[in-house]
Image: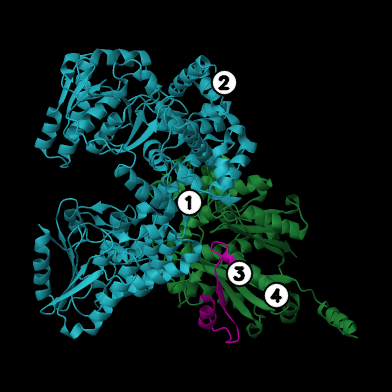
Amino acid sequence: MRTFTAGIAAAERNIVSNEAFVYDAVRTPRGKGKKGALHSVKPVSLLTGLIDALRDRNPTLDTNRIDDMVVGVVTPIGDQGADIARTAVLAAGLPNTVGGVQLNRFCASGLAAINFAAQQVRSGWEGMVIAGGVESMSRVPMGYDGGAWAMDPATSYDTYFVPQGISADLIATIEGFSRDDVDAYAVRSQQRAAVAWTEGRFKRSIVPVRDQNGVLILDHDEHMRPDTTAESLGKLNPAFTMMGEAGGFDAVALQKYHQVEKIDHVHTGGNSSGIVDGSALVLVGSEKLGKEMGLTPRARIAAVATSGADPTIMLTGPTPATQKLLALAGLKVDDIDLFELNEAFASVVLKYQRDLGIPSEKLNVNGGAIAMGHPLGATGAMIFGTMVDELERRKAKRAVVTLCIGGGMGVATLIERL
Amino acid sequence: MSETNTIRWTNEDGIVVLTMDDPNQGANTMNAAYLRSMRETVDRVLKEKDAIKGIILTSAKKTFFAGGDLKDLIKARPEDAERLTTWGNELKAQLRALETCGKPVVAAINGTALGGGLEIALACHRRIAADVKGSLIGLPEVTLGLLPGGGGVTRTVRMMGIQEALMKVLLQGQRYKPSEAKKHGLVDELVGTVEELLPAAKAWLATNPSAKQPWDLPGYKIPGGTPMTPSFAATLPAFPANLRKQVKGTMPAPRAIMAAAVEGSQVDIESAFLIETRYFTELAIGQVAKNMTKAFFFDLSAINAGASRPKDQPKTTVKKVAVIGAGMMGAGIAYVCAKAGIDVVLKDMSQEAADKGKAYSTKLVDKGVSRGKVPKEKGDALLARITATADYKDLAGCDMVIEAVFESEGLKHKVFAELQGVVNKDAVLGSNTSTLPITKLAEGVERPADFIGLHFFSPVDKMPLLEIIAGKKTSDATLAKAFDLAAQIGKTPIVVNDSRGFFTSRVIGTFLNEAIAMVGEGLAPASIEQAGAQAGYPATPLQLMDELTLTLPRKIRKEAEDAAKAAGKEFPLHASYGIIDTLVEKYDRKGRSTGGGFYEYGADGKRTHLWTGLAEHFVKKGHSIPFEDMKERMLFAEALETVKCFDEGVLRTVADANIGSIMGIGFPPWTGGVIQYINGYEGPSGNGPRGFVMRARQLAERYGKHFLPPASLVEIAEKGKLWE
């Protein structure tokens, strides 16, 4: 008898799938630093602007049926503190019944938020979730939130903490990527981003930032330098030499990576991700709720994966995360049409490409954070949206989105266009 | 014993003078009697405080207070953690009660206040020190592998700020003269004599009836900020990184000190004390503190007290020394002797060479004078004591000879033959050879009983050790004179019996050989260097080999091989020999002085990078062994060779082995020296000699039978004993 009723319940549930569908994806343009257009905009306003856009773009969305909002923030203090997700829900005038939770998985926070939302939906316990991230790096500086990893000497000493720039240079040294190699990659990022903007490839996602009176503040990514050449990049000084030597961090890394004699500092401001402000949100929901509201699903979140990696070289996590993701989905690298790895540093992308044998024409096809900037907590959600758009534009099937992460982690998500 | 009161109480018109005077010891220490006496004293202060105007804390001993009870601390085991925690917290609760009793407390520091002594004084509202000769003030716990657990970390951080306290006091354990201590704010006031202390203390009490510590005043902030202060937080991550850069992960004490300082800055002072106690206990129950306390306190004290000096010999003073050979060693020896007030005749083949040797002293003196460290007259007097000459006649009247000519038995014989008729008839005939057997050298002189090896280390003015080598015929009187010379020139003497390479040269060779063998095995040279650094060696092996030149071990080997052949003995081969030969013969790489060895050097002589030929000709790509094995191969090679030195009667005492290895040949200080390394070994399959033997056998299995432990060590290990 028991088995019988359980069977019926399962059958009822299976009338519609328990897939996590992507109904929409929006992002702000990225503002550049303290002189940039978004420095005068509060992070909560970046979020409310996008919430408004989700409502406008999806008039049949019944906000009373949104269960939760998950927002990734890397420096959740000051303007970004005190659960900015719930704050944004209230500030945007969403119903009081919509929850809000802020999470932090460093640079992958925005993607982790989407993955959590997908897991919530697939569990069946929630039906419609807004997920994404926000970071106003010009207003809340990176590292401003302290934390034991860098700020507690015993922890930092024991775990061989080094800043990410040192890790990126260590990757380049071990892999033999020269300054020319990383600069060439940076030029490619700028060129691809320029083409993507010129051809309007981001048009579907971009929501211009406007002030409370509707006056336009920013409608394009400010950080790009489309005229960048290998020559102009070659003139920049390495950014992490001082930190590595006077700061003692090279010695820390080399004590662990003892086969390396010396770290070759190849990364500069020009081949590393830019420091910018921005936000992105994705509407994730069940098939059932989408149907009931008359929303059209654009893609499904087919699999998600998280993996740790060595915390000192730190930025190698995307490879094991992607391998785990593909194993979960039963797929091979060749089955994937597009790979999007956040361009934290050029060497990170080059290593990932080498590890998995990804052809250049499938990887970061519209440029990335080297050209457009990396608004920490938001980036994962931004590049997720970029991939949803690009799959549609190409009428392709599968994309893998992944990011390297502080502390030595990787998060990856498999998107399948419907 | 436990009823002993170590603190006397006198009260004159409301001024209570607390005189620390442990009746059972020559110095006051933080023993059980102190702890109980201070508790009683503090309770009485609190009870009688209405009748007290002020308190003076001083000492009846020559020193103010000597610090922790190391005899007790060195025995601390993990199961003592709770007892030590209670002890540390009580110690500080007492001083905190005194600090907050509402009455002003003055520390009248009559003599040395190191460690616990300064910590007691830091709890007082004012520190007045007598600026007397020999008095030292500081928190040197780190040098024994410990941290100041009596409030020293917590209070210096609150006085000076985190960075200042770490750099100026805690991480290096600087010992300051009273005047320097005042400059750094560790004491507030100086008086010229001990007699002036109490009047000065009373005068201060008269004008400060209600003193409070700065950190107990409203609005107090730690100078320079805490991790909550953005400017401080911005530089904080570099602190532990630079610490790791310096200590390479070997020393737990600096890490614990930094952690206690930073963590303690984020909470109230009472909580900071608890944090400090926890880190102190962690160190005290650990092995490294025991190792370092054994070497740098017990062994060093024994050596400096003359434990190895023949007992019945009268004390002597050298008045005039003949230094033969004005090369780098001779020049350095001349300098340290002249600095100690000894007249020096510096002799070389030509006047020009002798003058060049003296110029080394001139350079050092000029540097000292220009930096204001040496008064001009003193420097001039030092130089005036050195006579550079090419004439043996000038050696007349010398009561000590230190020969430092080229390492050749024939040449040395010739030199002694020329001088023995000129110097005093009872002059000590010393040779600064680093490898040649003393007994054989002594065969070339008329008075072999007066002949002795005096092995100095380079650079002589910086290296603290003197390895004294007694030949077969060396008399006790000569040995005693050599000891007295060491004391006179401020060197730490160890004494060894004659053998090829003695103790230090012989043992350091095994360290270098092991590293070079690993190059031959195809391991990454950078890993070998890191293994040396992370084992705790102050100089990495391949860098050191380049400095010493690759031709030196070849020469030493040739001599040893010839000697073995002559004696009809087998000469055991080592895997390193072929590598050195290949580098020298095939690739013409002889070391730094000849343009390159394992490393490349720029036009300015600066080391640039490892020679790429190593990767090309030796490295086997992808070949690796456990990093721990790489470290321990070097450490074990030296420890095992030391055991053989004992077996062959070369070494006489464990203290000599430990101190000699650290001060002479850079054996890692955290180990407490080369024998303490065995006794304190913490290995994968056991601790102490037993664990060491098991690990040695494993290394022998993996890397060659030269790691097999000698029978003498196996015997001790099997009995569960220590090598003593």
Q: Residue A384 is drawn in which quadrant?
A: bottom right
Q: Chain of mark 1?
A: A
Q: Chain A, which colour?
A: green
Q: Which residue is mark 3?
A: A113
> Mark 4 falls on what kind of element?
helix
Q: Residue B164 is drawn in which quadrant?
A: bottom left
Q: Residue furthest front?
A: B312
Relative height, residue A171 to residue B557 (above, below): below
In three-dimensional space, the C-alpha distance between marks 1 and 4, rounded to whole angstroms, equals 37 Å
Front disc: 2 or 3: 2
> Mark 3 falls on what kind of element?
helix
Q: Which residue is mark 4?
A: A121
In three-dimensional space, the C-alpha distance between marks 4 and 3, rounded to whole angstroms, equals 12 Å
B495, B2: nearer the viewer: B2
Q: Which residue is mark 2?
A: B570
Magenta stretch bounds:
A84-110
Q: Earlier in the sequence, mark 3 or mark 1?
A: 3
* B298 left or right, relative to B321: right
Say which amino acid is labelled 4: Val
Say which amino acid is labelled 3: Ala
Q: Residue B387 is drawn in which quadrant?
A: top left
Percent coordinates x, y for residue B561 in the rendering: 51, 18
In three-dimensional space, the C-alpha distance between marks 4 and 2, rounded to whole angstroms, equals 79 Å
Question: Same chain for the residues at labels 4 and 2, yes or no?
Answer: no
Cβ atoms at labels 1 and 4 below 8 Å apart: no
